Amino acid sequence: MRVTRDNSTAAGGQASGAGCEHGWLTESRHRISTGLIVYLRCASCGARRVDHLGAGALVPSGLSRVVAPR
Ligand SMILES: [Zn+2]
């Protein structure tokens, strides 16, 4: 796995750390019923962020398999 770029979750990202181009590192991720919870931390200023990726944002291939009706 590689570090995901900060482009899928553009929910007003100017909270704190003015002047810091946050370089988010994934600390941990947890799969929940509604999708995926990702804990991020900025490597520069130490700011933290929690992202919720909906089920449509990251489709688990194992669950999305289509079973053809007979
Ligand atoms: Zn930062």
Image: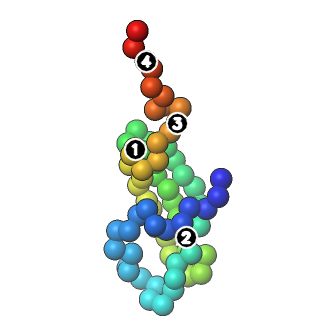
Can you tell me whether the CB of the residue at mark 3 lies under 8 Å from the nearest atom of ligand 1?
Answer: no
Q: Which residue is mark 4?
A: 68
Q: Residue at x 54, y 66 (%)?
A: 5
In the displayed structure, 20 sits above or below 3; it is below
Q: Callout 4: helix, strand or loop?
A: loop
Can you tell me whether the CB of the residue at mark 4 lies under 8 Å from the nearest atom of ligand 1?
Answer: no
Q: Which residue is mark 1?
A: 55
Can you tell me whether the CB of the residue at mark 2 lies under 8 Å from the nearest atom of ligand 1?
Answer: no
Determine if residue 58 is in view.
Answer: yes
- CA gap, disc 3 to disc 4? 16 Å
Marks 3, 1: nearer the viewer: 3
The numbered mark, 4 or 1, whose residue comes first in the sequence reads 1
- CA gap, disc 2 to disc 3? 25 Å
In the foreground, 68 or 21:
68
- CA gap, disc 4 to disc 1? 22 Å
Q: Callout 3: helix, strand or loop?
A: loop
- CA gap, disc 2 to disc 1? 21 Å
Give the residue type that dot 4 points to.
Ala
The numbered mark, 3 or 1, whose residue comes first in the sequence reads 1
Give the residue type that dot 2 points to.
Trp
Q: Residue at x 45, y 25 (%)?
A: 66
Give the residue type that dot 3 points to.
Ser
Q: Residue 35 in the image: x percent, y percent?
A: 42, 45
Dividing the picture into quarters, in which one does residue 33 lie? top left
Q: Callout 2: helix, strand or loop?
A: strand
Q: Residue 9 in the image: x percent, y percent?
A: 41, 64
The numbered mark, 2 or 1, whose residue comes first in the sequence reads 2
The numbered mark, 2 or 3, whose residue comes first in the sequence reads 2
Task: Say which mark, if any, is on residue 61.
Answer: 3
